Amino acid sequence: MLNQDNGPECKSTRTQFIKRICEFAGKFDIIVYLAYYPPYHSKYNPIERVWGVLEQHWNGGVLDSVDAVLKYAQSMKWKGKYPEIHLNVNKYKTGIRLDKQTMGAYEKIIERDKELGNWFVEIKPEKCKKLIMPTLW
């Protein structure tokens, strides 16, 4: 189960996100559940607490370089522990979308909860494999 913060990058209606999650489920043969926090309820989202601690830790600090940001992040403590910090230098491609027909195929294989709709999604690997690798089925 992936607890999602309901940000625009990982909504259950984002075409590339759903495509990649389906590929992941099919490749590793696991059921993936996407559970979304309600908007404006950051108190339920643990990562938001970490961001708050980090913001207080570097409050007033001069963040004028990547090195400065990394050092501040590495020296903060949350619940008595130091975080493991990695710098990701990969570029995230934006503006890439699936066409409506392709996304429609993905919409058919993901299962949205009848009551919660976009807030809780189940992705089964068998359905993903049939869509992504149809020649093997």
Image: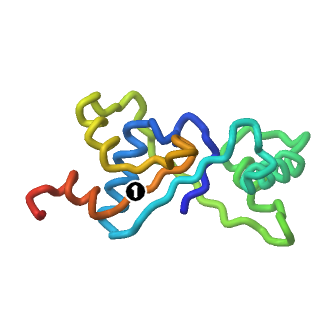
Q: Position of residue 64 (x, y in %)?
A: 74, 37
What residue sits 12% from the left and 63% below the top?
137
Above or below for 80 versus 74? below
Decide if residue 79 is on the left or right side of residue 9: right
Q: Which residue lies furthest to the left in this view?
A: 135
* Amino acid type at image mark 1: Ile
Q: Where is residue 15 in the image (x, y as percent from the top left)?
A: 38, 37
Give the image quarter of residue 75.
Answer: bottom right
Q: Position of residue 41 (x, y in %)?
A: 76, 42
Give the image quarter of residue 86.
Answer: bottom right
Q: Residues within 10 Å of mark 1 (few under 14, many from 20)?
A: many
Decide if residue 131 is on the left or right side of residue 9: left
What residue sits 52% from the left and 42% below the top?
117
Q: Which of 92 and 9 is in front in this view?
A: 9
Q: Where is residue 54 in the image (x, y as percent from the top left)?
A: 81, 51
Q: Residue furthest front?
A: 114
What residue sits 83% from the left and 45% below the top?
55
Judged from the image, the secondary structure of the residue bearing numbered disc 1 is strand
Q: Nearer the viewer, residue 12 or 95?
A: 12
User: How is the structure coloured here?
Assistant: rainbow
The residue pinned by badge 1 equals: 123
Q: Which of the image's four quarters has the N terminus?
A: bottom right
